Image (tube, helix red, strand yellow):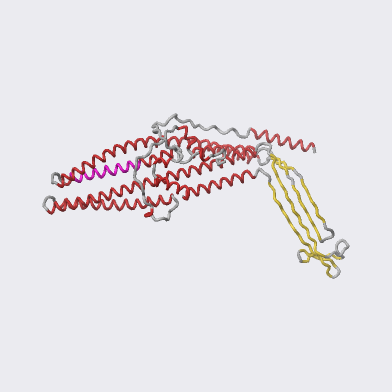
Amino acid sequence: MPRLRDTLWSAAALAGLTACAAAGPVRSPDVAMPAAFERAAPAAAAPLDRWWQSFGDPQLTALIERALERGVDAREAAARLAEARATRRGALADYGLRGDLSASARAQGTEVLSGESAIVVGGAGAGGLPGGFGGFDQEGVARSANVDFDVSWEADLFGRRAAARREADATLAAARFEYEASRASLAGNVADALFEARGLAVQLDEARETERIQRSLRDLTRTRADRGLAAPSDTARIEADLAQAVAEVERLAAELRASKRALLVLTGEAAAPTEGLALTGELRAPPPVPASVPGELLARRPDVREAEARLAAASGRLRLDELALFPRFTLLPGAGLSTSSGGFADATTAIWRVGAGLALPILDRPRLLSQLRAQEARAEQAVVGYERAVQTAFSEADQTLVRLAADRRRFDELSAGERQAERSFSAAGILYERGLTDLPALLDAERTYRGARSARTGAQVQALRRTVQAFRALGGGWSPTEAGLDARGERP
């Protein structure tokens, strides 16, 4: 026995020494970023966590809260998080006590037939035994029952349990950050859809106003033509413009209904009638975006935090694959209880067992080493994925802030131009009605005003939607502090 024990320990030490140099450390990711964005955002008091409240729009707040509570995207994200929590519990259970409780029962009947003993199991004959069994003619029913409880527990000599916990915790944290990213994205999608729908509603009102203007011009042109002050061709030209205005009203009305339907889907009310969604409020100037620096994206962006957690999970998995080359020591205690009655004797017997096992990966080492090398490659992919997430976050935030600044300037310029075009069109209408200008001049002024008004509305909607993008790009829509996430991505 001492010689066998020394041999086993020598083999275990050899397996451990050869496994130590199997895997190298995971490379540290390169997450260097500039100290500031090229276009710094203006300072604002509004927080990023619930950025939609900075718009001062009750309907926007109500729709986002409804979507976060009842939207299919939010409910699906919650289900994925619940799955991740259950998976973590299952992964850690493999390193605790394991065992099954087994039980069995049996009844055996014996009766004498024509001087011979026949064993009847469960009431069926099992053959005759001449002269009885063991010199006795024993008749009756013998019953027996057995209960066994066998347990196995792996002695954690090399840190497998700790490595498995680190991997499971990191995987759950990644799922938690994915959950937060899904909800933040949903809030942004609701705001974007609402501003798009409102923009279409304003454009529809403007198109109806254009139709009204065209009808007024047609009536005025007809009156002038009846008096011989305008050519009949002028009336035909106005009729053509009126037809285009009517067609534009129909197009925008259909686009608005489709936009409302998309908004209802996001809020979990896909089957509700679009007429029931009244667009309250008006297009306002977008609120300022809080000042931020690129380095804050590492903590603010949930997708970056998710990539970081997946890197930690890959590192933990690499350590587990490395430890798979080490020996496993297992304790195998057990206990049992056996009872019998109705046979030659009644008895109750208690049994206990104590055992130990040792498993050395000898012939399986090539497969384990191949698995380890594959996990090293996956860990490197996780490093690159984290670097990509950081670079993408910085690029999105920087580009969005630059474009948002341009959108705000564009809106201011177009608003001033729209006011000038409106004054020009009003003056041209008075001159045409008094016969001091011709129809082409009036139509040119009307088209200029209509184009300026449409451009201003489009710029305003674009600035609002870009502001939503900026809040999302800076990591808005969730609060790591309020959520109270621990190292596993869970609330304590």
Residue shown at 38% from the left, 36% from the top: 288
Q: Can residue 388 be seen by looking at this rendering?
A: no
- In the rendered view, does 366 fall on the left or right side of 429? right
Depth check: 384 or 229 in front? 229
Q: Does the magenta stretch include residue 360?
A: no
Count the labels in the image: 0
Q: Which residue lies furthest to the left in this view?
A: 228
Q: Can residue 98 be seen by looking at this rendering?
A: yes
Say above or below: 303 vs 258.
above
Q: Residue furthest top?
A: 35
Residue shown at 31% from the left, 47% from the top: 202
Say above or below: 439 vs 9.
below
Percent across and percent down for residue 433 are: 15, 47
- Predominant SS of the magenta segment: helix
Say above or below: 34 vs 354.
above
Q: Does the magenta stretch include residue 446?
A: yes
Q: Which residue lies furthest to the right in this view?
A: 135
Percent across and percent down for residue 227 are: 11, 53
- In the rendered view, does 322 fall on the left or right side of 300? right
Depth check: 294 or 492 in front? 492
Which quarter of the figure is the N terminus placed in? Answer: top right
Q: Give the range drawn in magenta.
A: 441-462
Residue shown at 78% from the left, 48% from the top: 352
Percent across and percent down for residue 236 are: 18, 53
Depth check: 89 or 56 in front? 56
Which quarter of the figure is the C terminus placed in? Answer: top right
Percent across and percent down for residue 463 are: 35, 40
